């Protein structure tokens, strides 16, 4: 086939280890016309806040934006499920001309009376930023009237990138902290930031910490509760799982409440173990926590390792391509795939920073392609050139994989299966194995042409 060319303006955002030395261009808005895989500011804010299950989430804008909320993620709740509902003010042409503030107030009044939430979030979308609705004043008025926090989320899509949506969400979450008394919280206590309970992952992680003797005060935001977030200022440590989305909140809490934070990942054997050991090391005055951690790690790895070794026999030498939201997830996936004997030939992220990409370059093998804010054409080009057997990404990447005739694994917010923790590593390995080893891919035109 003919070579696929990439846009000249995108060349600085692509790096092949061993062949190029330039600094990867990142932290910039997407190039117009490149049909970026990256999501907008509103998407960044809603993925962080929506798992708070006892709050109303109201999208202030045309109905189209609300289609990007209802049941779009696998964030589970152990109780209320307001986050599974999609509410919108459904602004029409008339509202855009005359303003949507009255419609917003009426919608909030009706929703709060009907569902009795602990709080309400109002997401400003693009058109609201253009017409200039005073969302702040409406939220303040309704909050005083109804007696619950009504928090504006300034998430107009045109304001920047998905990372700006994360920041808007962190500001909103910060307004919920220190609203409840912190009495009775253990000295060995943590908040988990950036864990969204996809497929029940937060429950797995909370159980691990409980077993080693560490209290989890709040999870932000998987299976989240407004009152638990209100007590979060009483925790001794913040543990940041999704660094791209929640490091900003951790810094705000460190500045105001003096709570230190560490960054961890719960994906894969190495990083899951490190997340437990790092927390145990922080509470060094309680030696029992470290002893319990060593026992837990040994027991959990012994449960899954024989099965991983069996799958590794067939997966060794297979090639994987990754496109994920943040680089910490990419780090963990690379390590997890190496446990299975697989080579990572392509890594792309939506929100990587210069520091993140420096670490990623060190972690990757020679010849690996690294991309920031990729588009379908670039992903297709390098998947074909590198001969990938598997593509790991999210809902927007799935069609690319299937059109190219290779297996796909969903590692984003839409999946229903937990992939975090030790049991999650086994789930991930089984999904990779079943996908890569399926005989159906041998019948695709691309594989037949390459004699594979």
Image (cartoon, rainbow, N blue to C red):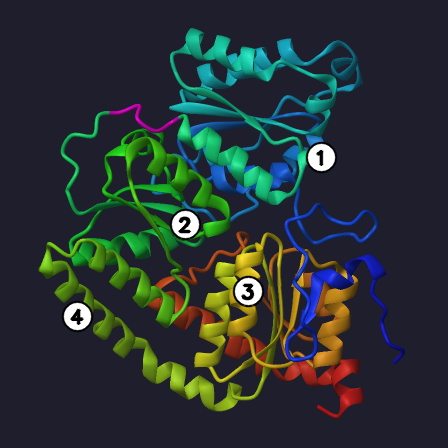
Is residue 452 magenta-colored?
no
Task: Tell me how far mark 1 sits from mark 2, CA to CA.
Answer: 29 Å
Q: Residue, x 16% and y 30% (percent of image)?
A: 183
Which class describes the residues within 10 Å of circle 3: few (<14), some (14-19), or many (20+)?
few
Residue behind mark 4 = 295
Residue behind mark 2 = 197
Q: Is residue 240 left or right of residue 136?
A: left
Task: Tell me how far mark 3 sits from mark 2, CA to CA.
Answer: 29 Å
Residue behind mark 1 = 158
**Residue 213 placement (x, y as % from top left):** 15, 54
Q: Main secondary structure of the magenta part?
A: loop
Task: Tell me how far mark 4 sits from mark 1, CA to CA.
Answer: 50 Å
Residue behind mark 3 = 358
Nearer mark to the viewer, of 3 and 2: 3
Nearer mark to the viewer, of 2 and 4: 4
Q: Vertical placement of 313 versus 19: above or below?
A: below
**Residue 77 placement (x, y as % from top left):** 39, 42
**Are circles 3 and 1 on residues that touch, CB within 8 Å?**
no
User: In the rendered structure, which segment of residues is drawn in magenta?
Assistant: 176-180
* Residue 157 placement: quadrant: top right
**Are circles 4 and 3 on residues that touch, CB within 8 Å?**
no
- The foreground one among 420 and 245 is 245
Q: Vertical placement of 396 versus 131: above or below?
A: below
């Amino acid at each position: 086939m003919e070579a696929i060319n990439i846009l000249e303006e995108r060349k600085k955002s692509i790096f092949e280890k061993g062949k190029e030395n330039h600094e990867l261009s990142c932290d910039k808005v997407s190039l117009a016309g490149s049909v970026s895989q990256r999501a907008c500011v509103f998407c960044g804010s809603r993925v962080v806040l929506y798992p708070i299950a006892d709050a109303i989430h109201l999208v202030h804008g045309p109905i189209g934006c609300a289609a990007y909320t209802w049941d779009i993620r696998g964030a589970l709740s152990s109780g209320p499920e307001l986050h599974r509902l999609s509410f919108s003010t459904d602004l029409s042409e008339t509202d855009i001309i005359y303003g949507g503030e009255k419609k917003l107030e009426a919608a909030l009044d009706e929703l709060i009376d009907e569902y009795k939430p602990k709080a309400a979030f109002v997401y400003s979308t693009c058109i609201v930023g253009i017409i200039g609705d005073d969302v702040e004043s409406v939220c303040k008025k309704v909050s005083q009237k109804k007696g619950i926090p009504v928090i504006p989320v300034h998430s107009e899509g045109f304001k920047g990138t998905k990372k700006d949506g994360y920041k808007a969400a962190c500001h909103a979450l910060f307004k919920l902290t220190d609203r409840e008394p912190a009495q009775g919280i253990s000295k060995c206590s943590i908040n988990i930031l950036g864990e969204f309970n996809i497929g029940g992952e937060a429950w797995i992680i909370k159980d691990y910490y409980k077993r080693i003797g560490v209290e989890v005060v709040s999870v932000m935001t998987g299976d989240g509760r407004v009152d638990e977030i209100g007590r979060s200022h009483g925790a001794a440590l913040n543990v940041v799982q999704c660094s791209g989305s929640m490091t900003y909140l951790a810094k705000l809490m460190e500045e105001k409440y003096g709570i230190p934070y560490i960054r961890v990942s719960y994906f894969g054997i190495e990083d899951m173990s490190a997340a437990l050991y790092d927390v145990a090391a922080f509470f060094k005055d309680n030696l029992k926590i470290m002893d319990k951690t060593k026992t837990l790690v040994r027991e959990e790895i012994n449960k899954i390792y024989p099965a991983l070794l069996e799958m590794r026999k067939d997966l060794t030498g297979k090639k994987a391509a990754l496109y994920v939201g943040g680089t910490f997830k990419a780090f963990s996936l690379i390590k997890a795939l190496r446990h299975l004997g697989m080579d990572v030939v392509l890594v792309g992220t939506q929100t990587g920073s210069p520091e993140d990409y420096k670490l990623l370059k060190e972690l990757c093998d020679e010849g690996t392609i690294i991309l920031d804010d990729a588009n379908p054409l670039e992903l297709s080009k390098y998947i074909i050139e590198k001969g990938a057997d598997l593509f790991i990404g999210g809902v927007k990447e799935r069609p690319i994989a299937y059109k190219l005739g290779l297996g796909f694994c969903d590692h984003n917010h839409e999946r229903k299966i937990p992939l975090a923790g030790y049991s999650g590593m086994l789930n991930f390995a089984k999904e990779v194995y079943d996908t890569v080893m399926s005989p159906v891919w041998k019948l695709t035109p691309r594989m037949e042409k390459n004699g594979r």
